[in-house]
Image (cartoon, helix red, strand yellow):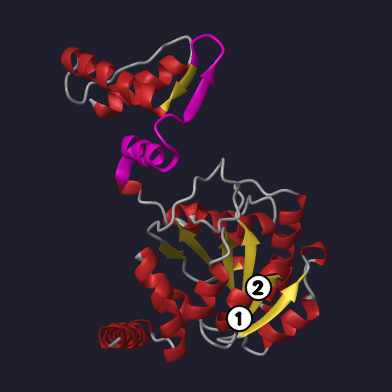
Amino acid sequence: MILTLALLAGLVLAWLLIGVAEKFRLGLRFTQALLYVPFKLAYRIGDSRIRIARKAQAPVIYVISHQSRFEPALMLSLLPEDTLHILDEVSARSPWLEPWRELGRTIAFNAEHVFVSRRLVRVLKGKGRLAVYLPDAVEPDVKTFRLFRAVTRIAMQADAKIVPIFVGGARSLPVSLTPGDKAPRHWFPQLSISVLEPMTITELVARNPEQASNTNALFDRVAEARLFGTNLDRGLFLAMRDAADRVGASHIIIEDVISGALSYRKLFIGARVLGRRFEAVTAPGEAVGVMLPNANGVVLSLTGLLSA
């Protein structure tokens, strides 16, 4: 019994000490830091860029890619305490999220009715901060585009800056919002928080005057945060290997009407064989042309060249 109590006391003390360290490292409130510690330890979160979000001058809108049920808890732990978080109805009612909802201000919204724009504009004009959680979509459907359009309108009326936030790895969490066949689940994937510098909608449009609309400029900026959270130094070959680790070597990646289906396992076996042959008949830096009649052959040859 004494040993159990001592162990519990040690765990509590360690939790408090780590919480104190996170408080001073990221500038959080102590209660925010304490509720952030479990996420930090379980998912080894890379969070250095969250300082950009915390230092952003109001009025500001944090646009978070909502990939899992964890993002609201994470952002309530990390964003400034005066931020008004606009949660979906599930997150607003979820019992397990209650301790994190107590950390800040939250309201629920119905996606079918978009936003109560006037109230949110008033909040921003009073030097306020908003956190909105928008669906993570490569190509938005009509409903998602309406949400982006509403956020764009609010930001322009209040002259607020946009700070996109993307949590890399959240798509693979057990509480992911993406179907399991598209994003295989992992209990403790490493997470990284990608945050871009604050910019107004006007500044975003000015970067590309030929942009189709203000809403497209916002959507592209959010997509940039997703790209920024990717390690581009890994290269295409290593990125494909990482994908195979996530979804499994037997996962089908290409289906050709002539040569059939190609899995990651077959791809890497073929790439290894072709890579050795290419290495034997080509010189370093030599240009190599690939002209093959089917998709499988092209992918195998390209991967073989990358690995040579």
Q: Position of residue 125 (x, y in %)?
A: 68, 86
Residue extent of the magenta highlight: 234-260
Q: Which residue is mark 2?
A: 94
Q: Quadrant of residue 5?
A: bottom left
Q: State the residue lying farthest toward the front.
A: 1
* Amino acid type, callout 2: Ser
Q: Are marks 1 and 2 in contact (CB under 8 Å)?
A: yes
Instruction: Please name whichever residue, 233 or 11, is drawn nearer the observer in this view of the structure.
Output: 11
Distance of label 1 from label 2 (alpha carbons): 7 Å
Q: State the residue lying farthest toward the right.
A: 113
Return the mark for residue 98. Answer: 1
Quarter holding the N terminus? bottom left
Q: Position of residue 254 (x, y in %)?
A: 50, 24
Q: Is residue 232 left or right of residue 94?
A: left
Residue at x 76% of width, y 54% of height = 143
Tell me if mark 2 has few (under 14), some (14-19) or many (20+) residues whose alpha carbon lies within 10 angstroms of its own.
Answer: few
Q: Position of residue 239 (x, y in %)?
A: 36, 40
Q: Secondary structure at mark 2?
A: loop
Instruction: Please name whichever residue, 17 or 192, is drawn nearer the observer in this view of the structure.
Output: 17
* Amino acid type, callout 1: Glu
As drawn, 54 above or below 285: below
Is residue 243 shown in magenta? yes
